[in-house]
Image: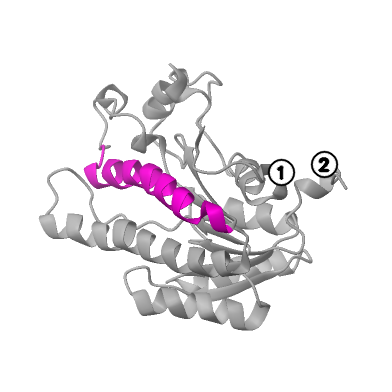
Amino acid sequence: MTQAPSTTFSLAGKVVVLTGGAGIYGRGLSAQLAASGATMILAARNVAALEKVAAEERALGRSAHVRSLDLMVESSILQLRDSVLAEFGRIDGLINNAVSRPMKSADAPLADWEASMQANATGLFAITRAFADTMATQGSGSIVNIGSIQGMVGPDYSLYEGLNMHAIPDYFFHKAGMVNLTRFFAARYGPRGVRVNCLSPGGFFTGQHPTFVERYTNATFLRRMADEHDLGGPVIFLLSDAARYVTGTNLPVDGGYTAH
């Protein structure tokens, strides 16, 4: 029997793990996914910040839980997976949203690049493999990687001219790699019912310098930067049964920035 659209786009009954649930992207995603009916597990190193988010969501009658996660430690990743399975019996979705940003400029010490690799490359691979293995055993699941348009295009230095802002090389490197790692895992786990997709957001408004905001806004078709309401819908789609035949794709959510 064909599902009704409202059911197809719902996350009701799904157990979803969101890494980095209190940050720039994470707070909006936490609210929107929980509102869609998911049992949300928020995971990051800063457990106190996550507890605050979870309490706010539970006060609205939503299901939100907190776990500790250090992406730089494989045992922490496996402990997260196993604790979720022990309590909820299954894992239907994983959103790889957490990111480490130790590099502050292209001239940063090489140690900062190496630390970034540990979390954003090795950690991404480790958690995706661990959770995809579990989903494959179940015969179903959806993984959404939160990338960036900086994994799709080179830096436009004219946006930063005269401002104390920088294009950071490790971010470009990792987000580009995330797109093709998405394709790798989609191919590897697709035959066992697991879908893997990437979402690449554009510039997100966080109170940047007005000159930057004006320049960036003028570079988008929609003439604005992204906000906390813009990412949840596409993520919910990719996690839901509405996207049951969508895998291995990279979806730009950028107001048209990369469509020039």
138 within the magenta span: no
Name the residue rendered at 50%, 23% in the picture.
256
Q: Position of residue 100 (x, y in %)?
A: 33, 58
Q: Which is nearer the eye, 112 or 153?
A: 153
Residues drawn in magenta: 167-192
Instruction: Specify the label residue 88 is tagged with.
Output: none
Mark 1 or mark 2, earlier in chain:
2
Is the Cβ of the residue at disc 1 closer than 8 Å to that at disc 2?
A: yes
Name the residue rendered at 53%, 52% in the picture.
190
Q: Which is nearer the eye, 163 or 249?
A: 249
Q: Is residue 211 above or below residue 80?
A: above
Q: Secondary structure at mark 1?
A: helix
Left or right: residue 59 compared with residue 153 = right
Q: Which is nearer the eye, 34 or 164?
A: 34
Which of the 4 image quadrants contains residue 85?
Answer: bottom right
Name the residue rendered at 55%, 44% in the picture.
247
Left or right: residue 131 compared with residue 102 = right
Residue picked out by circle 2: 5
- Is residue 237 in view? yes
Residue picked out by circle 1: 242
Name the residue rendered at 32%, 25% in the picture.
159
Q: Secondary structure at mark 2?
A: helix
Q: Quadrant of the C terminus?
A: top left
Q: Position of residue 37 (x, y in %)?
A: 75, 59
Q: Position of residue 117 (x, y in %)?
A: 25, 57
Distance from disc 1 to disc 2, alpha carbons, whole Å, reads 8 Å
Q: Is residue 71 above or below residue 26?
A: below
Q: Position of residue 66 (x, y in %)?
A: 57, 74
Under mark 2, the amino acid is: Pro
Under mark 1, the amino acid is: Ala
**Chief SS of the magenta region:** helix
